Image (cartoon, rainbow, N blue to C red):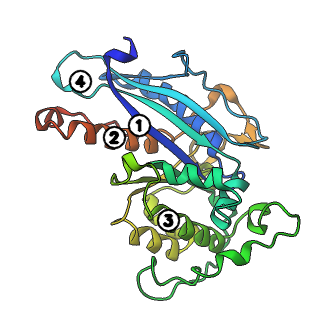
């Protein structure tokens, strides 16, 4: 079915934010791979991811090198009905995705010095949908509370301290953008700055009054071997201050926390371990990402319901996206 014949959502402009090595590019590739599981196991819909030439995207794990400079991935996502009735036809949509993936160092630097790193900063400001990628594998024990009591948006010790991280001894990147890993306190500091920037409003006038959607993705959870409520895991891995910060912004943004594993697990029972080995997959033939479709499905569903919301009749028949147990 040609894309022009399906319910078309042209405004899925997705920005990604995350430090170097946090798993942004892996998340995109794993999304393409996990879609194959849904396409095989869902009796109601088929799932397709197409490139800019409308050819199927080959799901392949990225190289360990990571993203060194800004990349835009123009993709088309389609949910195709396998049952021809009103509900399935109303719920079949196509999204044109423009996913902005920049080097983690530039994304971090863009919060410290928005003028010097204007491209990375403006990409965040202009996108309604943002994937905030947090890597918990470097989280350290003994996370101490640094927030004072009160609303995390106004009552924060970092409002005047972010520039202190711009120890520019090489004339290029701020100090924090050159670090090999971030502590939970540094993550908190940067996420506060990110939320503060995004709360100003969308730079695109057409979308200025529309709500932002922030999907906070806890990546590499196969290494942590933790399960349960992602909101509780956020507090456990990054500190209760991070959890409270996210809660304080729920009236400003539509926020949801996701637990993801782009590599997946290998083995049986208690012997399961991460499929990732030295930055690559231990056995590509068994690659089975988990949770990587969930943040995308959440964004798609919200965009579709917004569009159908102008017609109460259509919205009544809408079928939500499935959840993989």
Question: Residue tagged by mark 1?
Answer: 11
Q: Look at discs 4 and 1 and give the one toward the viewer.
A: 1
The tag earlier along the polypeptide, 3 or 1, is: 1
Name which residue lies at 82% across and 69% down: 168
Q: How far apart are labels 2 and 1 at the CA level?
A: 9 Å
The tag earlier along the polypeptide, 2 or 1, is: 1
The tag earlier along the polypeptide, 2 or 3, is: 3
Question: Residue tagged by mark 2?
Answer: 303
Name which residue lies at 22% across and 36% down: 308
Q: How far apart are labels 3 and 1 at the CA level?
A: 22 Å
Q: Position of residue 33 (x, y in %)?
A: 56, 29
Is 120 left, or right, of 39 in this rendering?
right
Q: Secondary structure at mark 4?
A: helix
Q: Position of residue 146 (x, y in %)?
A: 57, 84
Q: Secondary structure at mark 3?
A: helix
Is 107 left, or right, of 125 in this rendering?
right
Q: Look at discs 3 and 4 and give the one toward the viewer.
A: 3
User: Do labels 2 and 1 touch, CB within 8 Å?
Assistant: yes
Q: Quadrant of the C terminus?
A: top left
Question: Residue tagged by mark 3?
Answer: 195
User: Do labels 4 and 2 touch, CB within 8 Å?
Assistant: no
User: Do labels 3 and 4 touch, CB within 8 Å?
Assistant: no
Q: Position of residue 216 (x, y in %)?
A: 49, 55
Q: Secondary structure at mark 1?
A: strand
Q: Look at discs 2 and 1 and give the one toward the viewer.
A: 1
Count of picture labels:
4
The tag earlier along the polypeptide, 3 or 4, is: 4
């Amino acid at each position: 079915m040609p894309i022009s014949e399906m319910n078309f959502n042209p405004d899925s402009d997705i920005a990604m934010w995350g430090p170097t090595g946090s798993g942004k590019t892996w998340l995109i590739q794993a999304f393409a791979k996990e879609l194959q599981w849904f396409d095989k196991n869902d009796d109601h819909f088929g799932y397709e991811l197409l490139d800019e030439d409308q050819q199927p995207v080959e799901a392949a794990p990225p190289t360990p090198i990571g993203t060194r400079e800004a990349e835009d991935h123009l993709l088309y996502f389609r949910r195709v009905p396998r049952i021809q009735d009103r509900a399935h036809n109303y719920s079949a949509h196509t999204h044109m995705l423009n996913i902005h993936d920049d080097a983690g160092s530039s994304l971090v630097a863009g919060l410290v010095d928005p003028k010097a790193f204007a491209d990375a900063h403006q990409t965040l400001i202009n996108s309604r949908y943002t994937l905030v990628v947090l890597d918990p594998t470097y989280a350290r024990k003994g996370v101490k509370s640094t927030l004072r009591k009160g609303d995390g948006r106004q009552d924060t010790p970092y409002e005047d301290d972010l520039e202190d991280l711009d120890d520019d001894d090489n004339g290029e990147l701020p100090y924090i953008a050159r670090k090999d890993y971030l502590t939970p306190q540094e993550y908190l500091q940067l996420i506060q700055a990110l939320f503060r920037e995004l709360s100003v409003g969308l730079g695109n006038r057409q979308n200025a009054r529309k709500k932002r959607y922030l999907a906070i993705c806890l990546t590499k959870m196969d290494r942590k071997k933790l399960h349960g409520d992602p909101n509780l895991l956020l507090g456990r891995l990054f500190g209760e201050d991070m959890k409270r910060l996210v809660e304080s912004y729920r009236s400003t943004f539509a926020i949801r926390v996701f637990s993801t594993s782009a590599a997946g697990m290998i083995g049986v029972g208690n012997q399961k371990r991460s499929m990732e080995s030295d930055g690559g997959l231990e056995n590509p033939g068994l690659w089975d990402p988990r949770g990587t479709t969930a943040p995308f499905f959440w964004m798609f569903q919200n965009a579709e319901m917004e569009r159908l919301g102008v017609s109460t009749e259509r919205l009544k028949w809408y079928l939500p996206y499935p959840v993989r147990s």
